Amino acid sequence: MALIAIIDDDPDILDASSLVLKSKGYDVMTANNPNDGYKIVKEKKPDLIILDVMMDEPDDGFYLAQKFRKEGIKIPILMYTSVSKAIGLDFGKSEMVPVDDFVEKPISPEELIQKVEKLMNIKEAK
């Protein structure tokens, strides 16, 4: 089954997301900071990356997504965010935010699976 890397500093999000994805047969690796997340992506080459916007710094997720893309890593990225609810900012995919989809926290298990399956199907079609 596909390997998914979840990079988020919230242990509850890591646990809940992992549980949901594993229940659907996905293999999951987690990291609770950008440095460890970068390492697992480089070493394990997951099929999908789930990345939080805000970790140690408010823009860690954006920075890491940009770093992956600059290095030619084309793995689909689903970005977890609570930024738009917190500050009313709505952003979409762009060079500044080079991710494939966004999801607002908290996310329902159904929505998480739907987003993951959509991105996995897109990857398989390439």
Image: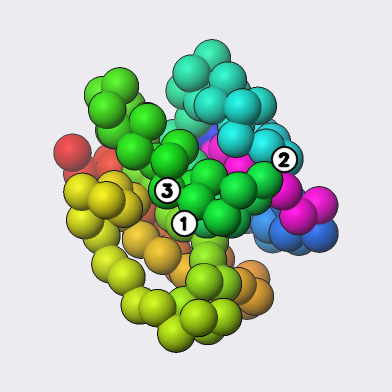
90 is higher (above) or lower (below) than 76: below
Name the residue that disc number 2 marks: 32
- The foreground one among 122 and 77 is 77
**Nearer the camera: disc 2 or disc 3:** 3
Name the spot of residue 15 as percent of width and height, x first.
79, 53
At label 1, counting other C-alpha atoms closer than 10 Å, the crowd grade (few under 14, some 14-19, many 20 or more) is many
Question: On the picture, is 100 further left or further right than 87?
Answer: left
At label 3, counting other C-alpha atoms closer than 10 Å, the crowd grade (few under 14, some 14-19, many 20 or more) is some
Task: Give the amino acid type for the residue marked by disc 3 in the picture.
Answer: Phe
Q: CA distance from mark 2 to mark 3?
A: 15 Å
Name the spot of residue 107 as percent of width and height, x first.
61, 73
Residue drawn at point x = 46 percent, y = 77 percent: 84
Name the residue that disc number 3 marks: 62
| Colour convention of the picture | rainbow
Task: Give the amino acid type for the residue marked by disc 2 in the picture.
Answer: Asn
Q: Is residue 107 shown in magenta? A: no
Check residue 114 in the rendering and tell me which mark sits there, or answer none: none
Name the residue that disc number 1 marks: 79
As helix, strand or loop, the secondary structure at mark 2 comes to loop
Instruction: Give the magenta range.
Output: 4-11
- Mark 2 in CB contact with mark 3 (< 8 angstroms): no
**Nearer the camera: disc 1 or disc 3:** 3
Which quarter of the figure is the C terminus placed in?
top left
At label 2, counting other C-alpha atoms closer than 10 Å, the crowd grade (few under 14, some 14-19, many 20 or more) is some
- The foreground one among 62 and 104 is 62
Question: On the picture, is 29 further left or further right than 70?
Answer: right
Which quarter of the figure is the N terminus placed in?
top right
Residue drawn at point x = 56 percent, y = 72 percent: 82
20 is higher (above) or lower (below) than 98: below
Label 1 or label 3, whichever comes before in sequence order: 3
